[in-house]
Amino acid sequence: MSPSSSSAAVAAPKGGDAPAAASPALSTAERESRQATWLVFGALGLGGALQIFIAPGPWALVLGSVLAGAFLFGLSQVMPGKWRDTLVSFRFIAVLLFALSLAAVGGTLILQNKPMAWYEQRYGLVGSLIVALRLDDIFHSLWFAGFVALFFASVANSAIVRWPVRLKNVGYWTCHAGLLTSLLGAGASAVFSVRGRVDLHAGGEVARQVMVTKNGLPTGEAAALGFDLKLDRFDLVRYTPEYRVAYYDLTGSQARLKASFDPEVGVKHLLPGGDSFKIKKLFPEFTTRPVAAGPGETPRLEYASLSDQMKNPAAVLEVTVDGDPRETGLMLAARHDHVRTRQGALVFERREDEVKAFQSHVTAGTGTDTRKALVSVNDPFTYNGWTFYQVNYDPKDPSYSGLEAVRDPGVNWVFLGFGLICLGVFYMFYLEDRFKKRKAPVAVKA
Amino acid sequence: MFYILAEHPWFVATSAAYAAAMGLYAAAWRSTRAIVGRIATGIMVAAIALNASLIAARWIEADRAPFKSLFESLVFFSFTMGVVYLAMEWLYRTRVFGAICALGSFGGLAYAVTKWDAEIVKLPPALQSGWFVPHVVVYFVGYGAAAFATGVALVQILSTRVPFVNRLLSVKAGSILSGEALDLEKITYDAIKFSFVMLTLGLLAGSVWAKSAWGDFWVWDPKENWSLVTWLVYGAYLHLRKVKGWRGEKGAWLVIAGFAVVMFTYLGMSMLPTAEASNHVYTGQ
């Protein structure tokens, strides 16, 4: 990204289109368009051709980007034909951003990082083409690296053009330094990070190594942790059970939950098709109790509740179908008792249990030097350079927990870059103009 | 659908308020009486307050931020579109765009009715993060600003083709309070700048969140990719604006195209062949 108006002032005579001189501006536009096309399609073609000999991957991406970026930068300094001016022009950057957009879109149209045979099996001839062009791993491909290299060369040249750093262009510097820092951090992350799975069972099973994965699939390699990691306990925490009167639509081929109502006595609810219902009686902890019978009467039972807690709820509904109110019999949630309406059915039932948290209680360390920690989703645990994330569980094996172990030397640089981007963008858009406006009267006086 | 509306009168009232504001803003285009425009703004404020109450009530009922499902996010999107519009009305002292923006908020609620949640779901572990609320809020404020910019860009394009629209922009029209001609291109640019800042914050906050949840700050998930595409397209617009010839209709069309990308990023993920690999497809879609 380039700065707002300060950069326009810098770039206009070279890369932009000066409104005053119509004819040269047109030729500048033509040159920029032509050279931008050459650069983008050149990166695409050259990267695509080299891809035949070099498989996509983190190293291909990072090395390809860095080497090609440095080469392009150097070349742009010595090449005649104002290639450097094109590289710093707003038009070229916009074209490059569109090219990167198309690459990103491509990655959402073609499933990435599947086994090669999968593409041919699923898409036939098109699948073979996808594999041949290595569109199965777009974001590690050499042509994508070519785009990143163009980006590097453009930003580096723009930096030279805008040197030195001043208050009026510090936003540009901060933002672009952030972009480069993030990209370099991401490169370091792609190349040097190690990630893998640690599968453990509660009760003291110990892991000393990580089963390395790539794109979520095991590579067969293992990386030593350098300490013991023990799973003491695994908890699958669920939300408190809730009950509902569910309305299922039965007009289709399958029953579909259409609406859900809290069990509240006396509240009338409308249903699709104009029917309605209300709960007449609710027994949170249902039971029956004998009613004292008078002389000569048959002893009978009545519905009652042992407490106000929803432990074994039952209800009696009043359902109005076609304007005709009818009282249902006792509906027990435990039995999923239901009553039909014109288009569907009302079911008194317990809601599906929803998971609140996956919690692994672990101990990390060696010998007596250990540390206990809780690992849960969004709350990872870091120890001796490794960070552990809660990523898996097995509903059939409550003692099992799957952790993702990551050692990533680049991530802090990525986040530092993010911070710089945010600051830089804000500065460019909302502070930079103040410095330019302040300077304007001085220029008039001079 | 009737049974839903009958069960939720506040939702109906909010929609009706947006519709009324839309009608009055449209009336303010032609009316010479300032009171019409003032009432339109008053009703828009009321609609936004009602919309805020819907969000607050849902928040209390669900015991979590109401941004989980598509329905909930649509209600919030209507709100942010309304709030961004009001801020812009105040900033640029014009009610020209009121009808379009009220239509946007009303449309959001109308679409939400078709995506009504069968029940309020609990928050899954992955969404139980301090990043959840800021990530969603900045994104939807950014979307609201992008929607506003798109409305202005549409007016900009139509003003050269439709005499009626051109007349709306006359300084004599009651809906321009400043007494100065509107610079539509500048208004669009300002809105996109603001949207871009919000999208940047949202994108980066999402990335930091992804790292704490899954251990990776970027996994080329379809939603991540399309969020990046949105950012890149608006980034390209901000650059192209410095290039001669891109401040007129071409720029306006690009803003509209950018919003189409925003909408696809928001609503279209389930259409992608890679949707099954995404962690971001809304429930209720």
Image (tube, coloured by chain):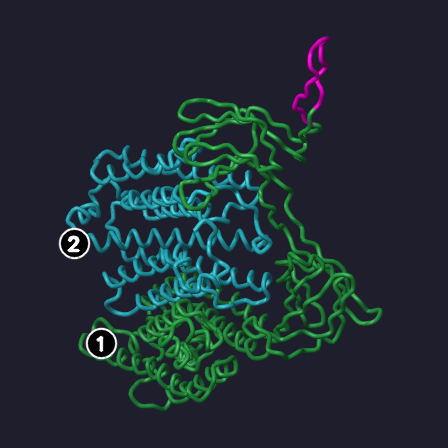
Chain colours: A green, B cyan
Mark 2: amino acid: Arg
- Residue A402 locus on image (x, y percent): 66, 64
Residue A203 visible (yes or no): yes
- Residue B272 locus on image (x, y percent): 40, 62
| A173 on left or right of A96 | right
| Residue carrying label 1 | A25
| Residue carrying label 2 | B161
Q: Which residues are magenta?
A: A289-305
Question: Does the magenta run of residues contain B26?
Answer: no
Among the 4 quarters of the image, the one containing residue B49: top left
Instruction: Choose mark 1 or mark 2, whichever is in front.
Output: 2
Could you tell me which residue is drawn at 75 percent across and 58 percent down?
Answer: A233
Task: Read off the chain for label 1.
Answer: A
C-alpha span from label 1 to label 2:
29 Å
Front residue of A57 and A43: A57
Kind of element beneath mark 2: loop
Could you tell me which residue is drawn at 51 percent across and 32 percent down?
Answer: A339
Front residue of B10 and A239: A239
| B68 on left or right of B185 | right
Q: As drawn, which residue projects farthest toward the right?
A: A368
Quarter holding the N terminus of chain B is: top left
How many callouts does the rendering have? 2
Mark 1: amino acid: Ala
Position of residue A407 relative to residue A396, above or below, is below
Q: As drawn, which residue projects farthest toward the top?
A: A295
Q: Residues within 10 Å of mark 1 (few under 14, many from 20)?
A: many
Q: Residues within 10 Å of mark 2 (few under 14, many from 20)?
A: few
